[in-house]
Image: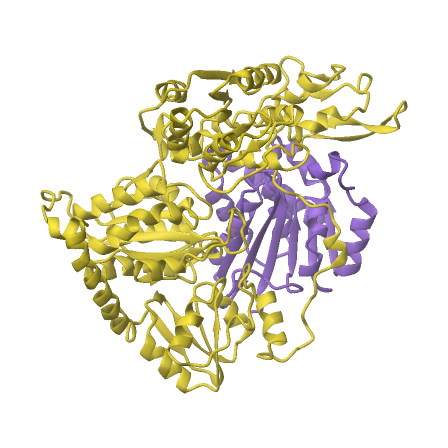
Amino acid sequence: MKDVNILVVGVGGQGTVLAGDILAEVGMLAGFDSKKSDILGLAIRGGSVVSHIRWGDKVNAPMSMRGKVDYLLAFEPLEALRQLEYLNEKSTVVYNEYKIPPVTVSSGLADYPEEALIQKALNEAVEKVYRFNATEKALGIGAVKTVNVILIGALSALLDVDVAVWEEAVKKFVPAKYSDLNLKALHTGRDLMEAMK
Amino acid sequence: MKKILSGNEAFARGAYEAGIQVVTGYPGTPSSEIIATIGKEYGEDIYCEWSTNEKVAMDAAAGSAYSGRRTMVTTKQVGMNVLSDSLLYAVYTGAEAGLVVVTADDPGLFSSQNEQDNRWYSRLAKIPTLEPQDSQEAKDFVVKGIEISEKFDTPVLIRSVMRVSHSKSIVETGERPEVPKEVGKFPRDISKYNCTAMYAKKMHAKVEQRILDIQEWANTSDLNKIEWNQKDIGIITSGVVYTYVKEIFPQASILKLGMINPIPDKLIKDFASKVDTLVVIEELDPILEEQIKSLGLEVHGKDVFSPCYELLPDRMKKSAVEGGLLKDDGKAVEQNELVAALPTRSPVFCPGCPHRSSFYVMNQLKVPVAGDIGCYNLGSMPPFNAQHTMGAMGASIGVLHGMSLAKIPENRVCTIGDSTFFHSGMPPLVNMVHNGSRGVVVIMDNSTTAMTGHQDHPGMEWQVTKERPARKIEIEPLVRAMGVKKVKTVNAFNVKEVKRGFEECLEFDGPSVLITKGECIFVSRKPKPAFTVNPDKCIACHTCFRVGCPAVVLSDEKYEKNGRLKSSIDPTLCNGCSVCSQVCPVGAIEPPEAGKESLAE
């Protein structure tokens, strides 16, 4: 098969690392070689977080090269835009519209880019852009922390892997007492994407 | 069984499969998850602990291995500087059972104060060193490391990097061998374990012969592998860089070194003789390159590839094209200008962080601040700009003392976290007391080792996992016992109290300690409901932004008198700590209504 290169980005604290873990697990369960690389750094909270996931027959480097990412899953609009150079004209972008302005913005040191600019730059760069307010959806089902699994659910509708595999991977990585809530989140995201695509 | 594991989880699994029984270390990115995983997954078979610092961890490991237990130590790259004092004697002595040290380096400086290449320690200590490329090798090399350690009676170093430790890949797991439950009496072998000069002289000669013996063994070991392909370019590489080489030079012949010290001289010469152009590709320093050149071979290395930062595939390709090793395929994607101009997003104090108030106050007091290593170093960033130095663990107290020695014309402060204080803050504080220094040592006690992922330290009631109780050492009586006459403990979430604490300690003519006590939000993990900004009261003065909280943001509403945007609070981020409301001059930031729940959970 052709390699599948995925990039998961967001703000520290949004659960992007766990989302990357789920994607790497799905790759293995679906029978691919699967690798993942995180930038954790000291970004316990509030910094940009980037996880590369790669599926294929045989994956060498655990990160994608610029221009080679097939799917960008972004938890925040500015962080989506920051990854432009990893995308190509055939890439697909899924992003959460909920903005988290960096402290540099409230400190008056920088401006948050206009929503229209973000949309235009992404639409011009890639084939498909899907966006929705995943944070609002997460609050809607009862916990802002499920935003990551909602976004995973949305991406799952675009990838050719059985839904049972996604469910199994989600269950492995979330605490047992939140299992049902997260499965609900998975399907919420998946249904949203089914309706959009 | 197939599992997908991070490099650090795989090192932990390796410890299990190598029959290791004791693991010690001090937390440090990117190494911390090794011991965390052992505590969580293999705690019944392996004793592990967070020792107070890396040197203590290494000494404990030596003692355990002398006693006949297979033992492992983990550290981040700069922790190796602390650990090395004890590693160097352990290399002289050897041990009764296998002893492996894992160092996780940080090319790219994602979470470190420098980019040192710990492969120099391999050469300095004359210690055999293995370098895994992925999680499978991370696991296998621990097992192999114990074998080599016991075969040659030497500690073995395993060098990881962030991209191995924090990447995940698929691992075929094995079983744990039988290991004895009991050990015998301690060996009274003075000439082997006492490095007094007359014995150490003989040990040195033994070490020199041993490294030659290991080199001979390495020439035929399956740790070092040649992959023959086209012979116009032959590449010598190791570790995760090998996986990048596979992406960028799919046609080249490759000698992949699993053992990077000592280098297999005969194998390298043989490989070199069969290729037209020899290239060594290594991240950071030219350690392999210089040794290969000393074999009399012509080789490209740092003339093509930078000694700084990671050599990720994009960068490797660019350098290889510029250095004439690759043809330009015109497909390289350059860095994007729009992206380069975007606002950066550096890490910040979390909403609800107990450090916020102290940095707000230090910014106001305009005192010079010697800083230390921990989350509180984020106080060096805007809007605080209030941590003026930072260099190494425990350094802040010594630097503060130096300011005092230099008689600077202003009073001064240093910051140090609770875990860092136990790590290496106690000797310099004793030094300040004994030598009559003046300055305020602020111990920021958040009841955890926060930055590296919330590990325990001696000031806590558990060790490694919350199920394992431990003896807690209180900081205040400890510093009093060290002879500090002025000690003040304040509630870190009360801005006025923190400010008064600073003022009182600054007045004291001598060394003083201010303990700012407040739990890290990850200790209780129970966010309080969000505060809100009352837009009718907000005068858009932006004082609340001076506490640098990501939950406090600009609203869409303008305050007409000054034309600036009013503040608002993101309820999904706010932890209800109230610090912003305490600094608001007009009382516009209001507490949550009774019964309201947090949205941040």
In front: A180, or B450? B450
Q: Answer above or below: position of B148 versus B264.
A: above
Residue B596 picture quarter: top right
Q: Residue at x 38, y 70 (%)?
A: B257
Q: Colour of chain B?
A: yellow
How many numbered discs sit on the rendered protein?
0
In the rendered image, residue A144, in percent from the top left (x then y), is placed at: 62, 33
Q: Is residue B99 left or right of residue B424?
A: left
Residue that sits furthest to the top in the current view? B594
Q: Residue at x 39, y 72 (%)?
A: B291
Residue B557 picture quarter: top right
In the rendered image, residue B192, in percent from the top left (x then y), is placed at: 14, 53
In the rendered image, residue A119, in percent from the top left (x then y), is placed at: 79, 50
In front: B97, or B365? B365
Work out which quarter of the rendered image holds the N terminus of chain A and state it: bottom right
In the rendered image, residue B207, in percent from the top left (x then y), is placed at: 23, 62
Q: Is residue A165 visible?
A: yes
Q: Answer above or below: position of B141 versus B365.
A: below
Q: Is residue B179 visible?
A: no
Q: Is residue B335 left or right of residue B16?
A: right
Q: Colour of chain A?
A: purple
Q: Answer above or below: position of B294 versus A78.
A: below
Q: Is residue B332 left or right of residue B430?
A: right
Q: Answer above or below: position of B284 versus A82.
A: below
How is the model colour-coded?
by chain
